[in-house]
Image (cartoon, helix red, strand yellow):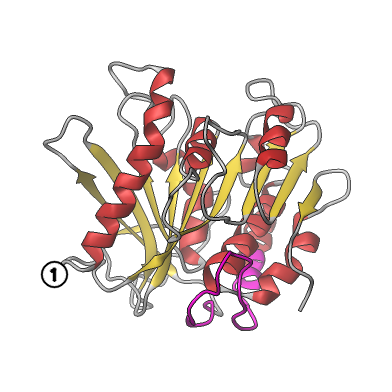
Amino acid sequence: MRVQRLLAALLVALVAGCGPAVAATADRVPSFRPAPPRPYAVGVRHFVVDPEGSRPLPVTVWYPAEPAAPPHATTRERAGPVPWPDVPVAAGRFPVVVYSHGLHSLPDLHAPLTTRWAAAGFVVAAPTYPRTNLRARDFTRADVRNQPADGWRLIRHLVRLDARPGDPLAGHLAVDRFAAAGHSAGGFTTAGMFTSGHPRRLRAGIVIAGGGLAGSFAGPVAPLLFVHGGADPIVPESVGRAAYARSLGPAAFLGLPGQGHGEYLTPGRPGFAQVLAATTDFLRWTLYDDRCARDRLPADAVLPGVTTLTTRALPDRA
């Protein structure tokens, strides 16, 4: 119960913003409503992009739900908000996070993080990549190189879906405010979406236990957050540090000394609260222009003995 109370209090604190600001991108962003002041209930739906194509892409979408969603759809210990299938989307438009899983994984395995982002006011769309997911019949890690294009295919689909009459998400997606995020191979996928000529609608990225692909970190400058365990045996921290050094513009590196490839993504484990706080602050700053989230990110990210934070070119405090 102690973990439940702490995480519930943390989520409430994270969504208590104090108004919009301008994120540090190459051009001034348009005005947008303030970040939500309190958590939402969470809905979930599924669809397939290009079901008849050569690379059908099943997608899980978590989204802010109407207050009329079941009242017990709240944070429970170690599980996060309980997502309710196909409940109505909350009123308004919400920024979108494309979340990419790692090798031998699935979107649902990342729900402790993604559902909490949805409760904080983001639509989170997580594709199941055709040849690297846990159930892939023709698994091949080399297919990661094709996944950034899948991520962009999903973004284009969501832009069209927002304008599709009758779709439950239509009119609820802030189609000029996307972020990409992912863990392990999904982190490399995320980095690969930031290549030369990428549209400015992709405003921010979160690379967890990953690094850069060929051509990454080119095109329009976007803030990036890197998260990495200091004793990661699968993707060494040096790979993440090298990607951080190569990235352009505002960036931060959240280190977890002594930790491995992702145990810090499990509620109740050391560092989870700091990873949740830092990533939520980062998304609120870059997608909602929330200057208070930007200002509190360094303090929220660091717990002595558990996490460290390095930053480059982040804006000064308001």
What residue sits right under mark 1 in the picture? 166
Query: Residue at position x 53%, y 40% from top?
Result: 191
Query: Residue at position x 23%, y 32% from top?
Result: 55
Asked if residue 24 is among those painted magenta in the image, a careful observer would answer yes
Residue 295 in sight = yes
Taking depth in this image into account, of 270 and 205 the one nearest to the observer is 205
Above or below, 150 relative to 21 = above
Q: Main secondary structure of the magenta part?
A: loop
Q: Quadrant of the N terminus?
A: bottom right
Query: Residue at position x 55%, y 70% from top?
Result: 27
Counting from the top left corner in percent of width and height, residue 204 is at 54, 56
Above or below, 257 relative to 252 = above
- Please, what is the three-letter code of the amino acid marked with disc 1? Gly
Decide if residue 253 is on the left or right side of residue 181: right
Decide if residue 99 is on the left or right side of residue 252: left
| Count of numbered badges drawn on the protein | 1
Crowd tier of the residue under label 1, counting other residues whose Cα lies within 10 Å: few below 14, some 14–19, many 20 or above = few
Q: Which residues are magenta?
A: 9-36
Counting from the top left corner in percent of width and height, residue 248 is at 65, 49
Q: Quadrant of the C terminus?
A: bottom right
- Residue lying at the far right of the rendered structure: 304
Residue 1 in sight = no
Asked if residue 318 is among those painted magenta in the image, a careful observer would answer no
Taking depth in this image into account, of 113 and 69 the one nearest to the observer is 113
Counting from the top left corner in percent of width and height, residue 251 is at 69, 52
Query: Residue at position x 52%, y 78% from top?
Result: 36
Above or below, 92 relative to 46 = below
Above or below, 65 relative to 159 = below
Counting from the top left corner in percent of width and height, residue 295 is at 75, 70
Name the secondary structure under disc 1: loop
> Which quadrant holds residue 162?
bottom left
Taking depth in this image into account, of 33 and 260 the one nearest to the observer is 33
